[in-house]
Amino acid sequence: MREITEEIKNEIKDMIFDYYAEECEIDPSEISLDSNPQDDLGGDSLMFVELIELASEKYDMDVKLQSVGKYLLKAPLNTMQDVIDVFCKIYQYGNEIVNL
Amino acid sequence: MTYKSNLSTLEITGDSAVITIENGKKNLLTIPEFIDKAVLEDALKANPQVTSLIITGAGRHFSHGADVTHFNHPMCSPMHSTHTELLRKAKELLLYIENLPVITVAAINGGCFGGGLEIALSCQFRICSKSAFLGLPEVNHGVIPGMNGVERLTRVVGKSKAISMILSGEILTAADAKKLKLVHHVSEKKDCMNDAAEFVRTLKEGKSALQIKSIISLANSTAGGNPIDPEDTSFDSVLSDKISRGVED
């Protein structure tokens, strides 16, 4: 398991908010930790997978799409807090996330 | 010229045609025949100058394929003739697109799954954005690709990879799809449409419609399993056309 600092967590949160704001064409200030990515922001289920793929190089994350898909069946993304938490878990555990 | 049919809009401008699939956020194929084959056929017959066709999806995604919630509907039973007929028409449409004597490109943004990928596979070229995902995940829904996607994927990526990819319902990233030569170019942009148009423009530049159509017809014939025909007169036709147009070398 890789350690994650508060600084990286905050950076990840900002990156995720910016990404959803851009993709959903809304102002980042309209997004809160309680926002539902699909119902409130108009996103879709593939957006998170795209985010992981796009950010994998920056955060040196080695994770297969199948592993992300399997984990999401156990941990649905109902709020933006969920999105951040799952992203941070993938950052920490990579492909091992399926065993959590 | 714009034609609306089933789930799509067909737009013809000069020598270029673009089909845009538009059905909700995911461009679901609630009707497998996403554009009426007769409409497409008539439009291309009325516009013989068309030498390229780009197929894309409106919004963020190419198409997420069939609406899987319909798989449990009685209408979807193979015993139901309507369903079988709809699928047969879709397969005929894809075969028609595959055999068109024009440059065909699927411009893929976002998700391209199931029937969406089957449509893309009927094109000669697939160009996608870097955030595209492609796969035939039908097995996860208890079925198999229904529009000859197994056969076409096998031709493109080879038998072993096609079988493992379809049986595992594997979803590929744009980069992985490029490595497998399932896609020909990955655009750095979010929307790959401009790259697809540029790709087509480069291929067409300086060639006559007859040259393009002759080359593609011969390639289609050979790819379709027909033997090489020594009696083929395409070369003579193109040469006569060049002379009659007064084209200098």
Image (spheres, coloured by chain):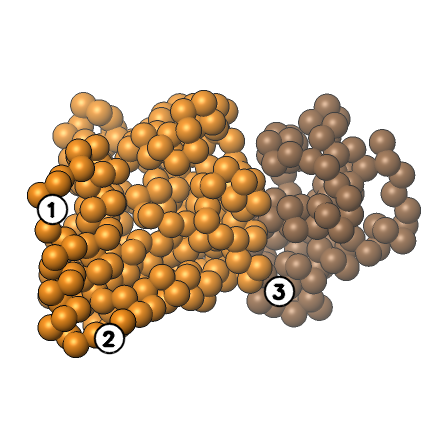
Chain colours: A brown, B orange
Distance from the alpha carbon under mark 2 to that under mark 1:
25 Å
Residue hosting label 2: B248
- Chain designation of label 2: B
Distance from the alpha carbon under mark 3 to that under mark 1:
54 Å
Earlier residue among tags 2 and 1: 1
- The answer as to whether the residues below labels 2 and 3 share one chain is no
**Image quarter of the N terminus of chain B:** bottom left
Mark 2 belongs to which amino acid? Answer: Glu
**Image coordinates for residue A16, horizontal then vertical, percent:** 71, 55
Residue hosting label 3: A22
Mark 3 belongs to which amino acid? Answer: Glu
Residue hosting label 1: B232
- Chain designation of label 1: B
Residue B9 visible in the displayed image: no
Given contact means CB atoms under 8 Å apart, are the residues at marks 3 and 1 in contact? no
**Image coordinates for residue B5, horizontal then vertical, percent:** 21, 58
- Chain designation of label 3: A
Farthest front residue in view:
B249
Which of discs 3 and 1 lies nearer the camera? The answer is 1
